[in-house]
Image: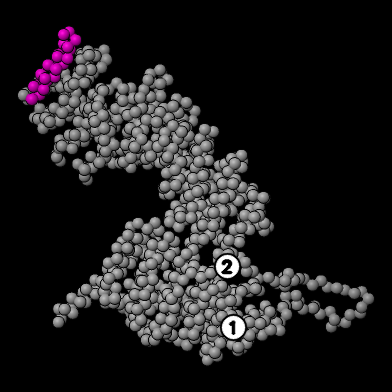
Amino acid sequence: MESLAPDTEVRVVVAQCFRTLTTSTDTKDIVPALQTLHSYLDEGPASRTTSVQRAEFRRAHFTRTLEFLVSNIQADWLAGLTAAQQAELWDGLFLKGPPEQALLVLMEGIGALRDSTNLDRLVSITEKFLRSGRLADLLWSYCLETGPSDSPQLRETLLGRIVALPDVTANRLHLKNKRLFLPQQYYPLLATEMLTALERTCRALKDGTDCSLTFVAQTLGKVCIQGHSALVLAVLAPRLSACTRSDMVWQRVCWKLLQNVPQRWMESVLTGLVQAVGGPDALGRIIGNLVLTNKKAQFVITHKLLLLQYKYETQVLRIVLGYLAADRERRPLLIQVLRSVLQAWANPSAVKHTPLEQQLYVSKALLLSVSLLKDSELQELRSELLQCMLGGMQSHLDSSVVRIRRMGMVVGECLSSRMDINKTKLKFEYDQDEGTLELLSLMTPTTGGEAEAEHVNGYVCLYISATVTSRFGRVDSPQETSETTPSTQNAPSQNKTKTDPDADLDSDDELTPYDMSGDQETSKASPPRYLRDCLETLISSEDSLRVELTLRVAEGLVRKNVFATREVSVQLTKVLLHMEDKYSINGFLRLRQATMVALIVTDCISVTQYLTTEFYSLNYSLRQRLDILEVLTLAAQELSKPMTEKRNPSLGIAAGTDLTPYPGDNPVHWREVVEKRIQSKTKRLRKGATQPPAKAAPNRYAPVAGHFFFPLLSNYDKPQVTFDLLGGDHLVLGRLVHTLGLFMHLAVNAPIAAQMGCALLDFVWAVRYHVDQMVRRGVLFAVCSVFLSMPSENLLVDLSDQLFETRTWLADVAEEDPDADCRSLAIQSLVLLDKSLKKQLQDQQALSMES
């Protein structure tokens, strides 16, 4: 019974104080009652209460006291206190007792009160609570485990109040919210209070006191899972990195802190931490070997950050992989990661179905992993690396996306350089951009900047070269065509005066000889003037100069002599289509292409029928089939443009040369430049028409659109010996679909547009779910062209059965396609379809109202 006397006494005294505060309005009674309640919170030799009484008050009566004060916040006796008495006796009760109880009461009061001065008072006390370091006291009390044994529900509620304090105050205060409660200030403050609790823990451990970091770890995990990891870890990570550099106690505290983070929040903490730390060493000091003891941490570090997510910067990859490579016990995980990344990079399905950004991210991870391998580890993995490298390069080079092919080349070069197979290294020709430079920089930097001039002779290089040649034929690049000039030309030499002492020279013989070292011999060959001569030269001549001159004048002769062109158009087209650049003529591809376009424009039906038939014929390389599509596209675009002026026959010759007139040669040029500049900077309120309206001209493409379009749809589903359009030749299929879509777009307002639109939708419907993203882009472009060019009334009449399925498919693509361009095209197609249908319905309603 004696042990219960202090409890009974505290309960009686607190009840008496409540009764006084409820019934009395005299300040002489109110102040002693509040002072009595304060006495149970005061510690030290001057305190009027015993430790047992203080503990009982904190355990059973403190929360009830604060709730009583909040419920009586409108009492008259509170208004009768002076400002100093209110701050000391009323506010002080919230700032002295157990901080977890005070925080819960304050949050509950803020959520319950309406806008008033009473709410402002609680907000002000909450600000004092945060600024006075009470959050650190709260966390520290749980580190010492001196607080009451709370239930899991109470702890979860307290965690929620701590983490969601900015949300609670924002929902209640709206525009009157305090700056301290904003996320940008509150969460860094919370991180600072967590650091204070961790510092106290370190000092306590050095003094031999046991501590628990469970509650701090739970707080960190809950903050990160709710999306505030960047604000918190931006304060925590640098401080933890600095403290763990030379203090083993700090390292133990950090390791224990991460170990106590609940599994469901581990991912958010680790992903935020790898973005906040400065390097792999700092990450290793903070989390230690957590990746070896925690399965969730291992999954996040070795799999999710590398293979499932690709939004992070390259620095995150460096930190994660460097962390795995920094410790002997963690290096087996680096080997495991390398195998997984290598398989993902070499997987043909991944190359076709994953976004380009993710493939670039995996390529970076692969190169960084290989660069961190030791020579002994590299020897053990040589066969696996070689096998996956060959398969992965094959998959990348087969892609129709230029950046994917370039990525495969760069990774192949880096891997072969690192493995050093038979002292040979792969070397490709590709354009440098930011992506390729970044990939190359991920490998261990090599000394010297000498360019490799030797040809690759290893069996790996031969295998890849043969594979590329068999798939794509011979591809001419700007690097391969170079213009050779004799060393004796274009380099003027100084003539040395030779004197002969035995010769008697007259005054006329002393003239200085004219320097003729830069002169070039006049060519005996002259360009042909007739189209028949051009044909004969291209068929039989072996003179490189005659062939080059013929190519440079061929386009002009074709456009100038219409009747002669129609006699030899098909034969000349056949010769140009099969012609190869045997003499490395400068601009060969451009000259050949321009002449074929001129042939189609001049004799449209015959040449178009020949090319569209040859597109599906045997014994053509993929390069030649792509040339056919490109020539047909350029010709259709030229035919669709109005002829407003007579074309100069010599224009083809000028276009074929590489010479461009110097601007200063034209005396009117500078006047035009000045006039345009004045016009652009002059503001006019009213301005009439400065140019006459364009004259109407017939569309030359509309009558022949069917000859371009329908033959290319005839044999697409018949695989040939060297050509399988619906099989592995994705590049040609994608280009074909895009070309057909362009033909459809150019046929707008043509009578045959409706028939073309129906046929095109039937064709692309079979390949709408193709694995290659370039094919899917072409399909969506074709669908857009149909909706743009086909009359709206025909959409409802001819395609009424397909519109619903087409709209459903476009909606699925807009939401689920991995390629961003495909999603964008699908959205555009949906907008066009809705506009066409809306216009047609409005027209029908207008007609019905008139009738």
Q: Quadrant of residue 503?
A: bottom right
Observer-side mark, 1 or 2, equals 2
Numbered label attached to residue 553: 1
Residue 263, horizontal then vertical, whole percent: 36, 35
Q: Nearer the viewer, residue 89 or 318?
A: 318
382 w.r.t. 157: above or below: below
- Which of the 4 image quarters holds residue 811? bottom left
Q: Residue furthest top?
A: 2
Residue 17 inside the magenta-drawn segment: yes
For the stretch drawn in magenta, what is the main secondary structure?
Answer: helix
Residues shaded magenta: 1-22
Residue neighbourhood size for the residue with mark 1, other residues' Cα within 10 Å, grouped as few (<14), some (14–19), many (≥20): many
User: Quick one: 848 or 348, which is closer to the camera?
Assistant: 348
Snapshot quadrant of residue 537? bottom right
The residue beneath circle 2 is 473
Amino acid type, label 2: Gly
**Residue for point 43% across, 81% down:** 707
Instruction: Tell me: residue 728, above or below residue 485.
Output: above
Q: In percent of the image, x 38 and y 39: which residue is there?
A: 267
- Compared across the picture, whether 454 is left or right of 80 comes to right
